[in-house]
Image (cartoon, rainbow, N blue to C red):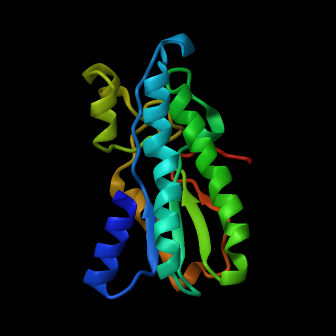
Amino acid sequence: EFCSQAVSKTVETLGGLDIVVNNAAVQYPQDSVEAISAQQLMDTFSVNIFAQFYMVKAALPHLHPASTIINTTSVTAYKGHEQLIDYAATKGAIVAFTRSLSQALLKRNIRVNGVAPCPICTPLIPASFDPERVAAHGDSAPMERVGQPEEVAPCYVFQASRDSYYMTGQILHPNGGTVING
């Protein structure tokens, strides 16, 4: 219902819809898989992947040839994370969703791509971890620092632009130098 309302209000306010960016996410670190409750699992999947599905479903009737959908995933989809098992699983699902949806919408000339950032300094990090862990966020990246939102934004701008019209089903990786082969 929320997705339908958001799309309707956007179409009404802007007179149409050309670009959909799915970027909502939650994460709840746990020390073991046994500590992940059924409710946490449902909450994580509901926000991280189900919402993307419902947003796309609500937006599709308003999209046209040359429109684009950009899904946010994470480097954890490729590397995993010992304390973010459910989060990493949703991010892997987003990669598969992006690739499958890109094939399904190819004949309609609607492109579907994604961005897999990490580690980035966003409000999600201090909401998820203690101050010590927040201070060290990004230290494990090859560049040995946390990325900033303005370093990720060009990936979304590129995928929304005409410069990326020959791309669909692809994931860009602004992640501080972590090599991703997959």
How many numbered circles does the render carry? 0
At 47% across and 81% down in the image, what residue appears? 62
Foreground of the two, 65 or 142: 65
Foreground of the two, 38 or 122: 38
Residue 180 rendering spot, x and y as whole percentages: 67, 46
At 71% across and 77% down in the image, what residue appears? 106
Residue 63 rendering spot, x and y as whole percentages: 51, 81
Asked if residue 17 is positioned above or below residue 102 in the image, the reply reads below
Residue 153 rendering spot, x and y as whole percentages: 40, 63
Foreground of the two, 153 or 10: 10
Would you identify the image quadrant in which residue 172 lies? bottom right
Asked whether, in this view, residue 24 is left or right of residue 103, the answer is left
Would you identify the image quadrant in which residue 113 lies? bottom right
Asked whether, in this view, residue 132 is left or right of residue 46, the answer is left
Residue 148 rendering spot, x and y as whole percentages: 35, 50
Foreground of the two, 146 or 162: 162
Would you identify the image quadrant in which residue 125 lies? top left
At 59% across and 87% down in the image, what residue appears? 65
Q: Can residue 3 be spotted in the picture?
A: yes
Q: Check the picture and name the quadrant holding the N terminus.
A: bottom left
Q: Can residue 118 be spotted in the picture?
A: no
Asked if residue 160 is positioned above or below residue 35 in the image, the reply reads below
At 47% across and 44% down in the image, what residue appears? 48
